Image (tube, rainbow, N blue to C red):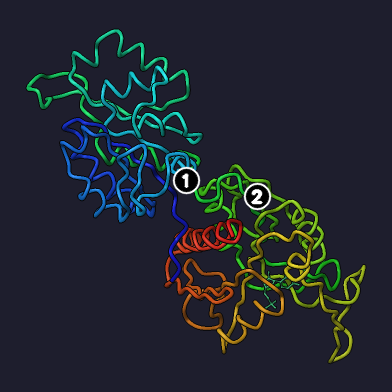
Amino acid sequence: MDTPFRKHVLLAICGGIAAYKSAELVRLLRKQGCEVRVVMTRSAREFVNPLTFQALSGNPVHTELLDVDEENAMGHINLARWADVVVIAPTTANTLAKCAHGLADDLVTTLFLAATCPVYMAPAMNQAMWNKAITQENIRKLENYGVNFIGPGSGDQACGEIGKGRMAEPAEICQRLLAEPRMTVLQSVKVLVSAGPTREYIASVRYITNRSSGKMGYALARAALQAGAQVSLVSGPVNLSSPAGLDIVNVETASQMYDAVLTRAVNADIYIGAAAVADYRPIAMEKDKIKKQADQTNLVLHKTKDILTDVARLNNAPFTVGFAAETNDLEVYAQEKLRKKNLDMIAANWVGQEQGGFDSEQNALEVFWDQGHASLAMTDKNQLAEQLINLIATRFNEKNRS
Ligand code: C5P
């Protein structure tokens, strides 16, 4: 399975006893799928050996402003550009003061000046140093410049005193960083989702439809919202309440869904076609109820326009994801649809079997893209949607970066 899209955290460590807690922070961030690069001041290296952070982050540790070591060759400007978020933990009173005054005499303070992404500081110092008016003034100044502070907490201090100045716990720092909007995998990406069945009218009182509940599409819309996306949902008739915070368009027929999707797809970055669109519709809708007459009757059906194919054909087409519900030869049909409809990704599931699929709370998916495949095991549709959104974000961001 492909590596999930990783958010880039630049962790700067200053010289304080709390530096040992930063090792746990690196571990937690990596567990959450972040890529972490560590920068240490000279005094931080007196407390913890850089090797600890190299081993935990899987990357060489940066220590010098002018780094001649080839392995560490990413210069300070590139490091600052690389970061989605910078966190200085622990931030000492000294680094805090230097940053507040725009000094840049080492790698950490230079990175602070060069960073254009959000910056977080987790101060750690003796309670008297923390309470000193000049420190408080520096903090206010940095807050006014947009720096986000995490902690400090109160309690026993390494110096034997009791008071405010303990670095926030790694779990709290990790949580705050992950809540940063820049850290969400689809921040500001425009996602369009279609969901539910369509109704194809035979007459005003009768229609052809299918068993789609819309649950998967709605779960995908919700997961995309949680990942920071701006979401539009084009929905066929379902019995579900619409997630708050998205733009919803209710439609009934395949033709209405076609129009609603195509007009919005031109402005979308990602289109996820999770709707079970009818493949055929009656040629014309009878105005009145068709009366019972002959023992047999014929219904002439016309093929509907394929929404997915036409979205993928647009100039500047969004990243297009289709679904395939199959009763046999799942991989063969899914790969064929991926190619024929010119999709970026297809999520295939078995239907007509005991497990998952239509109208069920659970599902499992086989996901295919050009030269790649992932199996998402049977689970609750909300969890499955989160996993699929993560996969889509990974492929979408890779495509955009290449
Ligand atoms: O070819 P098939 O209908 O099995 O493909 C399913 C995929 O195509 C789904 O993503 C569905 O939303 C989409 N589709 C469509 N327009 C149609 C029929 C299917 O977008 N008319």
What is the residue that sits farthest to the top in this orientation? 133
Q: Mark 1 against mark 2, which lies toward the viewer?
A: 1
Considering only vertical position in the picture, is 92 above or below 221?
Answer: above
- The label shown at residue 2 is none
At label 2, the amino acid type is Lys
379 sits to left or right of 324 = left
Give the labeled residue for mark 1.
82
Give the labeled residue for mark 2.
190
Considering only vertical position in the picture, is 287 above or below 71?
Answer: below
What is the residue that sits farthest to the front in this orientation? 68
Q: Secondary structure at mark 1?
A: helix
Q: Nearer the viewer, residue 135 or 15?
A: 15
The x, y position of residue 113, in whole percent, is 45, 28
Please identify the quadrant where the C terminus is shown: bottom right
The x, y position of residue 38, in whole percent, is 32, 44
Considering only vertical position in the picture, is 20 above or below 218?
Answer: above
User: Which residue is pictured at 38% across the width and 52% down the height?
Assistant: 35
Q: Secondary structure at mark 2?
A: strand
